[in-house]
Image (tube, rainbow, N blue to C red):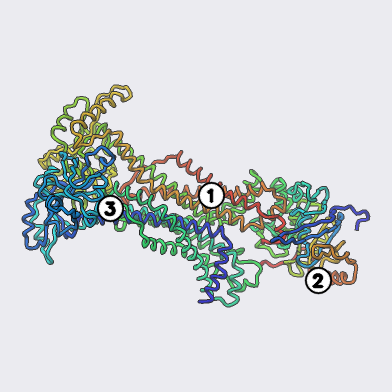
Amino acid sequence: MKFFFFLLFRISLRHLLRQKLRTLAALLAIALGASVFSSVRMAIDGAGESFASSVTQVTGRADYHLSAGPEGIPEGLMADFLHHPDILRAAPFSSVYVLPDINNKEGERPFLLMGLDPFLDTSFRQWEPESSGEEENGGISELVTRPGAMLVTQTLARRLGIRHGDSLRVLHGGKPAEMHVAGILEEEGLAMAEAGGLALCDMATFQESTGRYGLVDRMDLRLHAGADKKALEAMLPAGVQMQPATAFRDTGLAMVKAYRMNLLVMGFVSLFVGMFLVYSVVALNAASRSGEVAMLRAMGVAKVSIFLLFITEGLLLGIMGWLFSLPLTLLGYPFLQEGVGKTLETLFFGKGVAAHAFQFQDLWLTLALTLFVAAIAALYPALSAMAVSPKMAMAERGFSDKKTGTGNLRSVTGLGLLVAVPFSAGLPAMDGLPLGGYMAAFFLFGGTALVLPWILARLGPGMALFLGRRFGVSAFLAARQFRESGGRIALAAGALTTAVALFVALSIMITSFRETVRVWVDQSIGGDLFIRSKMAELNDYRYPLSHDLVAQIEELQSWDALGYRRVGLERDGLAFDLEAMDMETLSRYGGFLDVSGTSSDAYFYSGHGPLPLLVSEPALHLHGLDKGQILDFYVDGVSVPFEVKAVVRDFRTRTLALFCDMEALAKKTGKREISGMRLFYKMSSGDGGKEKDAALELLRDQLLKDYGDSVDVVAGLSLRNAVLDIFDETFAVTFVLLAMALGIAGLGIATTMTLRVMVERVGLLTLRSLGASAFQVRSMVRWEAGLLLAFSLVAGLACGFVLSYLLIHGINKQSFGWTFFFALDGLNLLAGILMIFAAGMLAAGPAMALALRGSPAEALREGTS
Amino acid sequence: MDENPVPLVLASGLCRFYGRKGVELKALDHVDLTVNRGDFVLLKGRSGSGKTTLLSLLAGLDRPDAGSLRVGDYDLSPGASPDLDTFRRHGVGVIFQSFNLLPTLRAVENVMLPLLLAGGRQQVAQKRAGDLLGSLGMGPRMHHLPAELSGGEMQRVAIARALVNEPMLLLADEPTGNLDENNAMAVIDLLADLVKNGATLVMATHSDMADPFASHIIHLMDGRVSAPRPDPSGPEASSVKKAALATDFPSHPIQGKNP
């Protein structure tokens, strides 16, 4: 062991230190990769934990919830359960997001108002008003006795600049409410949920303030050990469900599972690209030290020690790279945290993601992964070094000059991996994760990297001769060099190909996705003006539009109104949003984007049999709901059978969308409510839309004046842009990760070319001694970099197109249930490719300068062949 | 030996110093040298005596710090501004101890290289390189990579590369240093034949093998010329030549074994 460390410190470390540039580049690449991976992982897991912790604080110690969706359950049920022998404790709970009615930015930031029973609730949630010394005038006593009384968190009090005794008017989908601050909550337990953005009040106050008289959102239960759950369920009225208290949290976390994995894979790609550079360093060390290895072997050093020596070199690079990554992670984490948290809130959680602290213990996993990657990268060079025969100590030349004979095996393995791509891509998702798709992507990259040297070797002497004839000796030499040193160049080509393929694939996927979403927005959710209750999405459309408002809209002559009703449904643990709408009006202004079946089959209902239903694409791909199926749902307490007529595109993330005709549904359930309206301007004056804009402005102002406290009125164009903005923000993180991967690949080009120049130093000096001018030498290096880039770009483009197909029709479909139209933004793609090419050529600059360093006289003192 | 010698290399008071950590090392210290066309000059001396430095200056690979140096029409003296690239392409051909063949180029491509660097057309260069390699007995091996050639074969490729542009001066730095005795002798014979056919050669060597063929032997010690040339027809030289001639190996082709 002592001897091993002697070898490690006296030989390996000295080699690494002697090749400072090479080592530094590998360390930087690993550091960047590890930093991206750490930051992404901590950001997404932190956001998930923050959400889970927030939900847990709100859930408290409940075992089960009784709920009936946004409709709520009658509070009379409370008495039945409270006195049931199987029930240990029970407490009601309601919540709604409200907006403070103040004229600044905080007026646009909702907080959660909770309604609970202050006495029953102590068995479930931990919260306490701050002791003010004047107990009789504040706290719980005031909470239950004073109308509109609420306790606010310190965070909310700070944000809104309110304190004990202040009043606050709050807005929601119903009638505005006048609230009174009865105290400030201690910063513990429940007060830590929702990132501190909450207030609580007595259930009676809540019902008065929100207009939900006699209803509670849910009932929290703690059961006695051995309680008969089935008997309890039998007591429930139709439409009320009894679910484990963790269901909401688990559903939320399950929704982000695929997103998490996709992001982690993207983060891992940076580490994967960095792996090429570690391989490059260890492989070149192993090759250049073959004589030394042979000598060590001749002196009796065991094969396994040589193997471990090179593996340890890789591991040392991994550890050092990880250490280098720490400051980068500290710098980059806040940005990723904000981006990822915002995306998760927007797409999946709605609210409840707080900023989360940097946790050092999270970095250990990155260290383990970095070491694994570094060890894998060092494996092949270590095996090559282990195979060096002690006989070579007597030979003049090292093993690097000889063919190792493993080329064919490598190429065959590579081809095998490429052949496995379509099979792997066709595997079904495992536990909701597209593992087959990721394996296919890995096979694609691995196979390409292994086959690249074979392709390079078969580019044929024709390329060198052709380039030589067309562009002179520099191009000829570069092409020959490029072709013969395929193995070494393949490393950089592999790294760059991976990065370019990612760039191309993600560009295509994002362009396709955006284009599909744009068409979907324009066709399926279009309109000139949108009206819905305040914070309708956040509050699950629990507030319908008032009859007055609906009647007023329907009387407008110049506007066509498409009313819709949103109902939250649950079935087999899945959350659905049923959107019942006036299909006849919809068919005049747009429609659905069909995936299978014909959506117009669901526009008309004969009045007999199941209601025609459209289901969104994720319901098909993730849960197997397909046309022809009959589904029963409880809607408004009535069991309604539906028949799936078609599958349509929909890009909602939080729930699965269902569509049916509003009138047909009303006939079945007897309930007529309008959750929102889409208005279309009927008069077309041909003045470029000026008249429409003026009418829209007029109507919006009027509606806001009359109903602004309870409804949101948004111009269609603004909503369309908001949807597309959310889309763009969602992919911003992806682009950051992509930029990192490309940066590392650029580093790879710089290192590869510099290394090539260093390794071929004597050859270059010999060229100078044969009369090559500085221009010719520079030109040769430039040509080599250009060929490497061109080759990688071509390979990357090919891989990128395949990968984009995998992403669109495999990974995305299995992760989120979506597929898209294939769309290509050729100009942007070309611009990106040209930028990569230009950046790569710039990265070769130092190598060009290095190629001219040193006197040609040194060629006399050093040898090559 | 030419009756009316035409000077090709004229060096006078040639100096080359290297500085390292404030200590000046005189690699060449006021060396005078004249090489006539058709001469076969041997540079001898221990390691570090200045042989390679002198060759570097003659090859235009390095510049002298003092003195004057002229090779043909090229003034390589300090202060002069010769076009060194052109001089290296056309004026000299260098043969290296370690051959310095570009490992990624095949034998014929290595030989084509100086022609291509000088702007020659590929087809013309390939034909000329092929012919030259053929005349050196390397025809069957011309499409091999250096790694597939023996040491002797590699050196013959290197000689062909040095000759391909018909330089006025051939320079060889320990051309037999990496070869076994048989191959070394064959290379010496080849070089001697080239001189017989009109080439001018300056060769740095430790070996005595080439002594019988040399027209001048210059001994260097600590950067200075240390002794007059010995008589190539002297008893020691004769015995070397005899020994060399006594070997059974034909001069062409050189027998070699692939590594």
Tell me the SS state at disc 1: helix
Label 3, label 1: how far apart the Cα atoms are? 40 Å
Residue position marked by numbered label 2 in the rendering: B247
Q: Are marks 3 and 1 in contact (CB under 8 Å)?
A: no
Label 1, label 2: how far apart the Cα atoms are? 53 Å
Q: Chain of mark 2?
A: B
Residue position marked by numbered label 3 in the rendering: A255
Q: Chain of mark 1?
A: A
Marked residue nearer the N-terminal end (3 or 1): 3
Would residue A462 be visible to someone looking at this image?
Answer: no
For discs 2 and 3, the disc positioned in front in the rendered view: 3
Left or right of residue A552, residue B111 in this image: right
Q: Between residues A161 and A647, which one lies in front from this camera angle? A: A161
Q: Are marks 2 and 3 in contact (CB under 8 Å)?
A: no
Residue type indicated by callout 3: Met
Residue type indicated by callout 2: Thr
Q: Residue at x 13, y 58 (%)?
A: A221
Image mark count: 3
Residue position marked by numbered label 1 in the rendering: A791
- On screen, A761 above or below A100? below
